[in-house]
Every structure is written in C-alpha cells, then in structure tokens.
Image (cartoon, grey):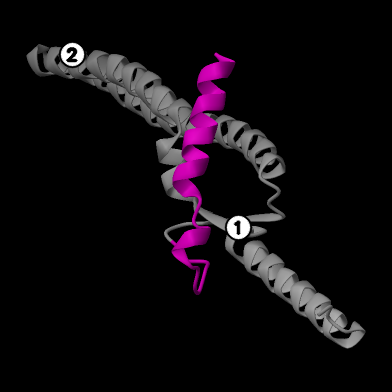
Amino acid sequence: MLPTKKESLLYASLVVSVLVVLLFIFQFLFHKPDVVYVDNIQLFDGFNMTKEMKKIGENQFNTQKTKIDSLYVTIQKSNPAQQQILMKEYVALKENLEQFNQQFAYEETEKIWKRLHSYVDEFSGENNYKLIIGAEKKQDILYADPSVNITNELINYVNSKYEGAK
C-alpha cells in the first residue's frame, strides 16, 4: 500500500528536520572560532628572528665588554696619573655600552614586532580569524578556553614564513 499524502509529508518533514539537526551539529563540531588569543611573550621569544637578533646583540655586547674589562685591568696596573686618564675613558666606554645595549634592544624589538605583525596579518586572513588577542601570560584575559590559544600554531607559522623569507 502506498503512503498517503499526509504520511509522505510527515516523512519529508522528518528527513528535513534530521538534515537540519545534522547540519547544526556539523557546523558546531567543525567551526573554527573567530576570536583567538596568543601569548605575546611566548610568541616573541619563540620567533627565530628574535633568537638571531639576541645572538647578534650578545656578540656585539661581549666584544665591547671585553675591551672595557681589559681597560680595567690596565687601570689596575697603571700609576695614579695614568689611572685618572684611563678611568675617564673607562667610564665613557661603560656609558656607551649601556647606551648601545638599550638602543639595540629598542630598535631590534621594534623590527621584530613589525615583522611579526605582518605575518600575523597573513595568518589571520588565511585562517579567517576576525580577532587575534595578544596577551602577556593571560594577564589581560579573564578567561579563555585553551582551545582558542593558538600561540604554538602561530609560532610555527611565523617561523616558517621567516625561514622562507631569508
């Protein structure tokens, strides 16, 4: 016996309802969030450019510090008249070293963040993120589900972009 018009309509409604429910479940399970966050410090420290610039800065710092240390040894062995002259040079070199250290850190940090921001822009576009929140050790975020922390994923992305850009 063939189903009646009423039964056919009921079956069709049931099938449509099941499909709608399955669609919502699929959307819920496989939808990426629009808003995510990263740990700024972890991102900065994990970026290969940061590591390279740190090594360069340390090498330059150590070279200058070695000169200062050897001048100090010379001062210790000098007569009092020479000590006064050499001490002025020593103080000037120490001040220059401190100034170099601060300036290097500031300038390189600016360069690194500029590069990171360009990579983050690309990353957000490729992953359809509407907002990426940067926080330091989650201090600026009251709560975030760990699933929206994309720090490691972003570190891998920026490093692969950076290594490819060399």
Q: Does residue 13 appear in this view?
A: yes
Badge 2 is on which residue?
Answer: 70
Indicate the amino acid at tag 1.
Answer: Phe
Q: For residue 51, which quarter of the picture?
A: top left
Residue 57 horizontal/vertical position (percent): 39, 23
Q: In this view, does 113 lie above or below 5?
A: above
Separation of disc 1 and disc 2 at Cα?
64 Å
Instruction: Say if the magenta span includes residue 158.
Output: yes
Q: Which residue is drawn at 50% across and 19% down?
A: 163
Judging depth in this view, the residue of 84 and 126 nearest the camera is 126
Q: Which of marks 1 and 2 is in front?
A: 1
Q: Does residue 96 appear in this view?
A: no
Residue 62 horizontal/vertical position (percent): 28, 19
Q: Cβ–Cβ below 8 Å for labels 1 and 2?
A: no
Q: Residue at x 88, y 84 (%)?
A: 4
Q: Pointer 2: residues within 10 angstroms few (<14), some, or many (20+)?
A: few
Q: Which residue is at the far front?
A: 1
Q: For residue 79, which quarter of the picture?
A: top left
Badge 1 is on which residue?
Answer: 30
Q: Residue at x 71, y 65 (%)?
A: 23
Q: Which residue is drawn at 52% across and 68% down?
A: 141
Element at label 1? helix
Q: What stretch is highlighted in magenta?
A: 138-166
User: Is residue 12 toward the left or the right of residue 126 in the image?
Assistant: right
Judging depth in this view, the residue of 160 and 1 nearest the camera is 1
Indicate the amino acid at tag 2.
Answer: Ser
